[in-house]
């Protein structure tokens, strides 16, 4: 077994550390405690969380069959969150990861079909996701939601749900090595390539304002977002949440090194990727405004948080939430409304008409 799974006291520590993350993704906290409380070994995490997700999926199908579309949509979204969160550790069963992510993607699609029929599938070189529109807004600005190392487009419902009523369209995507693409591709540190391909696709539409593009990146997605802000001129405003300014492979904990090794395909490729996660050469070149959000309790060995980015970027604002953990799942009221307000303001978003 790998070094990560040999860590003493791993199961209770992993369950505790990931509680705010899974609950933030859409799981009920009491159900999380029941599901994880029954675990005897962390290797059983994927099966247990996938089973919970499939239970919600079955109930959503029953609700849809009975014509209860709101309940069905909520159930599909909850199922998608559980199914994705089943994948958030470097488990040796890669087929299970692919199966869970594919079912999560299908569940989110079914939810949107019931409640947001104008939502569109978007797919291109290096990305796949959903484009969602605010109601009552003509040619809205758009914000791209960029997930992190082991995240996916299904994890950040709350971010999208906060942006939409502020008059902003949302493109939530899986990029290389993420979500639906986790077993089909490897992470891309030159994320401006992914962002450029995505914005090229969106630029062909006449229902979006391509001159008002923002991006929010979470965890490693914060690094990707900052890279895109520096190198993709169409990005007008950027927010990062728990994003690293740099990684030091020699200091990173086994969870991170083993996850990157899986996602990159080998330890050598993962080390090479980690050496490219450095924002000091780029931060000063970011031309637009950037909001950097950190949690004061977010301490990952080998990962430098966002403060250096905020200090070096010429138009940066820094929001430190002292009691916030990684992704600040334990402190959403302290950053999510302010961050989505800030993005909407920077992009000149119009509030939806009643």
Image (cartoon, rainbow, N blue to C red):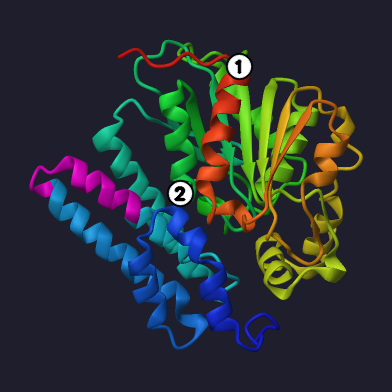
Image coordinates of residue 173 in percent, x first then y, are 53, 40
Marks 1/2: CA–CA distance: 24 Å
For the residues labelled 1 and 2, say whether their Cβ atoms are less than 8 Å apart. no
Question: What residue is shown with label 1?
Answer: 212
Q: Residue at x 66, y 46 (%)?
A: 221
Relative side of 216 to 136, left or right:
right
- Check the image and report above or below for 207 versus 115: above
Element under disc 2: loop
Question: What residue is shown with label 2?
Answer: 154
- The residue most toward the front is 322
Element under disc 1: loop
Magenta stretch, overall SS = helix
Q: Residue at x 64, y 87 (%)?
A: 1
Q: Residue at x 42, y 63 (%)?
A: 99
Q: Depth check: give the residue in front, 216 or 325.
A: 325
What span is in magenta? 65-78
Instruction: Please say whether residue 141 is one of the residues in the magenta stretch.
Output: no
Q: Residue at x 46, y 76 (%)?
A: 45
- Decide: few, some or many residues near mark 1? Use Cα within 10 Å; few <14, some 14-19, many ≥20: many
Any mark on residue 171, and which?
Answer: none
Whether residue 123 appears in this view of the structure is no
Relative side of 18 to 132, left or right:
right
Q: Earlier in the sequence, mark 1 or mark 2?
A: 2
- The residue most toward the left is 66
Image coordinates of residue 228 in percent, x first then y, are 73, 33
Quadrant of the image containing the C terminus: top left
Image coordinates of residue 105 in percent, x first then y, are 41, 49
């Amino acid at each position: 077994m790998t070094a990560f799974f040999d860590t003493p006291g791993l199961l209770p520590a992993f369950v505790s550390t990931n509680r705010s993350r899974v609950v933030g993704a859409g799981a009920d906290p009491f159900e999380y405690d029941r599901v994880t409380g029954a675990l005897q070994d962390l290797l059983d995490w994927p099966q247990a969380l996938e089973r919970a997700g499939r239970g919600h999926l079955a109930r959503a199908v029953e609700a849809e069959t009975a014509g209860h579309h709101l309940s069905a949509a909520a159930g599909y979204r909850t199922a998608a969150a559980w199914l994705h969160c089943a994948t958030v550790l470097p488990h040796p069963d890669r087929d299970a990861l692919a199966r869970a992510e594919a079912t999560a993607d299908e569940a989110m699609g079914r939810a949107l079909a019931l409640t947001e029929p104008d939502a569109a599938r978007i797919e291109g070189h290096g990305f796949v996701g959903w484009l969602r529109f605010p109601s009552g807004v003509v040619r809205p600005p758009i914000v791209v939601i960029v997930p992190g190392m082991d995240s996916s487009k299904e994890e950040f419902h709350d971010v999208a749900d906060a942006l939409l009523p502020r008059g902003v369209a949302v493109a939530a995507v899986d990029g290389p090595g993420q979500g639906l693409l986790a077993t089909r591709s490897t992470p891309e540190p030159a994320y401006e390539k992914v962002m450029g391909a995505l914005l090229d696709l969106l630029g062909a539409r006449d229902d979006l304002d391509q001159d008002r593009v923002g991006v929010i990146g979470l965890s490693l997605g914060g690094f990707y977002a900052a890279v895109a802000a520096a190198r993709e001129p169409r990005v007008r405003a950027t927010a990062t949440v728990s994003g690293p300014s740099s990684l030091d492979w020699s200091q990173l904990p086994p969870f991170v090194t083993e996850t990157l090794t899986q996602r990159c395909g080998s330890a050598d490729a993962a080390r090479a990727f980690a050496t490219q996660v450095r924002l000091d050469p780029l931060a000063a070149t970011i031309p637009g405004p950037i909001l950097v959000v950190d949690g004061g309790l977010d301490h990952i060995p080998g990962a430098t948080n966002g403060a250096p980015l905020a200090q070096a970027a010429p138009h940066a604002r820094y929001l430190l939430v002292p009691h916030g953990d990684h992704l600040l799942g334990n402190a959403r009221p302290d950053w999510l409304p302010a961050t989505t307000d800030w993005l909407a303001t920077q992009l000149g978003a119009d509030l939806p008409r009643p």
